Image (cartoon, coloured by chain):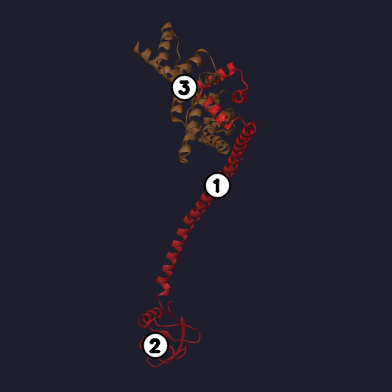
Chain colours: A brown, B red
Amino acid sequence: MDEKEQLIYYKQTGDLQALGKLYAPYMSLLYGVCFKYFQEQAASQDAVMQIFEQLVHKLRVHEVDNFKSWLYVFARNYCLMELRKQKGKMYVDIEDNMSESEQKLVMEDEGKWTEDDFDKVHECLASLSTDQAVCVRLFYLEQKCYKDIAEETGYDLNKVKSYIQNGKRNLKICMESGKNGK
Amino acid sequence: MENNYQLSRIHNYIHGLMSREEMHALEREALEDPFLQDAIDGYKMQQGVDVKSLSLLQQRLERRIAEHAQRKNKFYFSWQRLAIGMVGAVMFIAVCTLLLIRYLPNRQSANVTEVELMDDDLTQTAVHSLPGGDARPVDGWNAFSAFVSEHYSGVNMEKRLEVRFKVGQYGLPYDIQPQVAKKQPIYEEIIQVLQKGPKWEGKEGHIEIVFPE
């Protein structure tokens, strides 16, 4: 049974064993995600269990197409809601998160590239801020890892990551606008 | 498992155990997969992957699932019990209703007979002779009974009253002796009723008056 069939099976039968099999492989990733939000071991472990509890009901009602990305969005929302409940404990950079969830949506339609597109990339790359352009170029064209880029440019490691994330997003927007304008 | 593979990659990445190419590959993957990116961020904050606590978490999930199975059984049994109880209650009510339906009309008819009895005998005073007396009313016993019922006040403790008397020359009763204590009001009343009443045949009167209840 693949994930999709397992989901349908669970929705029909409510067999927790099946849901457990579906959920277990994602637990360690989920734990990481929860730790990012709660920054505490016990709270993150509880959150992973609580998310499971919610899935017990949610997955009997909702039709889910792509379990992995659905689970990610669900878990993140859960963590954000929890943090909102215990106000004043926000460590999350909203800007950062926005870019990530958008990427997921955009990456679906990566069609074929033409010669024009390659020219366009260089144009768009030039339109980015220097920080973003440098980091994107080093990462995508020279295939360097964050650590090397940080060493080379002298930026903070987290800065490098967000330059690349945002640069990538802006690049995408720039490319899309070009396509629409054709 | 893919899961363990990713976990060990994250572990290696955080602890700098990867080559530059591998790091780049993971970073690139994470850029396309925010789930992975967040997980890496989380573990980086935790400064490493704690395999032991993760396996404890797995066990917690297993326990949770086993517990559910038990709870489901309990739930099932209690439902079963409840269902049996409900069926029992419904049957009990049905039997009670049937009994009531059967029993009620019977009681009504019994009531009706009782009322008829009252009409016939119990509201009427009856008089009849007792052995030892030869006197009898000139108009017959029924007429005399009707006369007594009509003239008797109804204030009386006795149900049966024995009366002895003698019949005089013109058929009038005298020396009337109700067989009851003199101080009871019925004593005088019966004497008056007999004196006013119809004439008698014979000599010795020994009668019993049966009063209605």
For residue B28, above or below residue B148:
above
For residue B92, above or below residue A177:
below
Query: Depth check: A1 or A166 in front?
Result: A166
Task: State which mark lies toward you, 3 or 2.
Answer: 3
Res B82 label? 1
Q: Chain of mark 3?
A: A
| x and y, in percent, of residue B154 in the image | 39, 81
For residue B114, above or below residue A18:
below
Res B121 label? none
The residue that disc 2 covers is: B189
Query: Depth check: A4 or B105 in front?
Result: A4
Res A163 label? 3
- Quarter of the image holding residue B51? top right
Q: CA distance from mark 1 to mark 2?
A: 73 Å
The amino acid type, in three-letter code, at marker 1 is: Leu
> SS of the residue at dot 2?
helix
In the rendered view of the protein, which quadrant contains the N terminus of chain B?
Answer: top right
